[in-house]
Amino acid sequence: MDVYFVLVEPAVAENVGSAARALKTMGFSRLRLVNSKVHLADKARWLAHGSSDILESAMSFTTLE
């Protein structure tokens, strides 16, 4: 099953890190971000704790389309 999690304009890096950690805990790995680069911030990595691979492979898009 191909499941993608899409976060639209996330503003808080810590929330993106927490989302990555939750995805990994549930066995998912595909994170997409729209109009945001906060997943690259150190704060996102701190909260991802052991899920940095999810952040590193996350793709960023300028629009939802």
Image: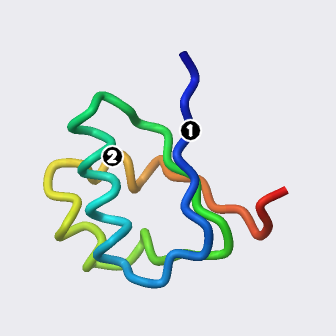
Figure check: 33 above or below 57? below
Nearer to me, 44 or 18: 18
Figure check: 25 above or below 48? above
Mark 2: amino acid: Asp
Q: Which residue is mark 1?
A: 4
In the visual, does 49 lie left or right of 37? left
Label 2: which secondary element? helix
Q: Which residue is mark 2?
A: 53
* Circle 2 residues within 10 Å: few <14, some 14–19, many ≥20: some
Q: Position of residue 17 (x, y in %)?
A: 30, 64
Residue with the most extreme right position: 65
Q: Quadrant of the N terminus?
A: top right
N-terminal label among 2 and 1: 1
In the visual, does 7 lie left or right of 39? right
Residue with the most extreme bottom position: 11
Mark 1: amino acid: Tyr
Colour mode of the rendering: rainbow
In the visual, does 64 lie left or right of 52? right
Task: Identify the residue at horizontal 58%, vertical 61% (top origin).
Answer: 33
In the visual, does 29 lie left or right of 4? left
